[in-house]
Image (spheres, grey):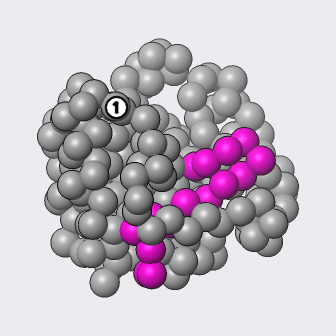
C-alpha cells in the first residue's frame, strides 16, 4: 500500500498569501490536478496543512500540521505520522506539472528505500519524494534539535535512492516537472505553459 500527502501549509507571502492549492489552472484547481495524478498511483491521498480550516479539500482528508513552526520538515513528520501506509509520496501543493508516469516511477523506486528522492540539475527535490515510516524517529530528532532542512535527512544513515538527472530526463525532457509556483510571475509562466500544452 502506498499513500500520498500534499503539503499545503505555507503562507505564500510572495503570492499575496493566496492559497496555492486553490489557484485556477485551466478548467480545474491546481490541487485537483495533483490529486488526479496521485490517485492513479496511491491508495490513499490526503492533505497536510497548518491552515486546515481554509482548505477547500472536497472529500480529501485534511490533517492539521503537528509542528506549525517546523516548516516543511514538520509537515513531512505530520504526513508520515498520519499516513496509513508504510510508504508515502510527499509533494508540495505548488507543483502543477507532476505526471502520473513519474509519480509511479517514484513510488516503485521507494519500495526498497527509506527515501527515494529526485536530484535534478537544480539539486535535490525533497518536496516530490517517497518516504518510509522508518524516517519518523530521525525526523523527530532533527525537529527537536531545531535542524529543519529536509535534505539533512540524507546524511542520517537512512537508505536513500536518488533518481538522478539522466533518469529524470526520460520523464521530464523540457525541465518542467519540478517547476513550482512561488510568485505571481511563476503562476503566469505556468498558465502560459499550460496554454501551449493544450493547443
Residue 111 in sight here: yes
Residue 64, x across and y down, in percent = 16, 42
Q: Is residue 40 left or right of residue 168?
A: left
Q: Residue at x 40, y 52 (%)?
A: 156
**What residue is shown with label 1?**
147
Examine the image and state in which quarter residue 185 appears: top right
Q: Nearer the viewer, residue 168 or 21?
A: 168
Place of residue 153 in the rendered image (x, y in percent of width and height, measured from the top left): 42, 49
- Residue drawn where x is 43% and y is 35% of the image: 149
- State the residue at coordinates (44%, 74%): 113
Rendered residue at 77%/40% (across/down): 192
Chain part drawn in magenta: 111-125
> In the image, residue 42 lies at what x, y percent?
39, 76
Q: Where, quadrant-wise, is the N terminus in this rendering?
A: bottom left
Decide if residue 34 is in sight here.
no
Tell me: 84 left or right of 4.
left
Amino acid at each position: 500500500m502506498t499513500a500520498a500527502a500534499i503539503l499545503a501549509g505555507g503562507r505564500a507571502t510572495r503570492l499575496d498569501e493566496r492559497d496555492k492549492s486553490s489557484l485556477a489552472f485551466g478548467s480545474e484547481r491546481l490541487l485537483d490536478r495533483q490529486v488526479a495524478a496521485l490517485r492513479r498511483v496511491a491508495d490513499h491521498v490526503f492533505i497536510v496543512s497548518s491552515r486546515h480550516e481554509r482548505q477547500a479539500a472536497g472529500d480529501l482528508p485534511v490533517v492539521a500540521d503537528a509542528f506549525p513552526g517546523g516548516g516543511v520538515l514538520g509537515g513531512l513528520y505530520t504526513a508520515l505520522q498520519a499516513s496509513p501506509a508504510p510508504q508515502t509520496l510527499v509533494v508540495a501543493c505548488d507543483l502543477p506539472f507532476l505526471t502520473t508516469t513519474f509519480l509511479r516511477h517514484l513510488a516503485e523506486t521507494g519500495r526498497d528505500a527509506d527515501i527515494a528522492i529526485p536530484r535534478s540539475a537544480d539539486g535535490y527535490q525533497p518536496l516530490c519524494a517517497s518516504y518510509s515510516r522508518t524516517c519518523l524517529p530521525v525526523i523527530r530528532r532533527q525537529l527537536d534539535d531545531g535542524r529543519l532542512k529536509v535534505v539533512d535527512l540524507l546524511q542520517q544513515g537512512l537508505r536513500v535512492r536518488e533518481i538522478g538527472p539522466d533518469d529524470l530526463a526520460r520523464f521530464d525532457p523540457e525541465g518542467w516537472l519540478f517547476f513550482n509556483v512561488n510568485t505571481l510571475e511563476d503562476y503566469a509562466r505556468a498558465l502560459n505553459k499550460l496554454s501551449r500544452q493544450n493547443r
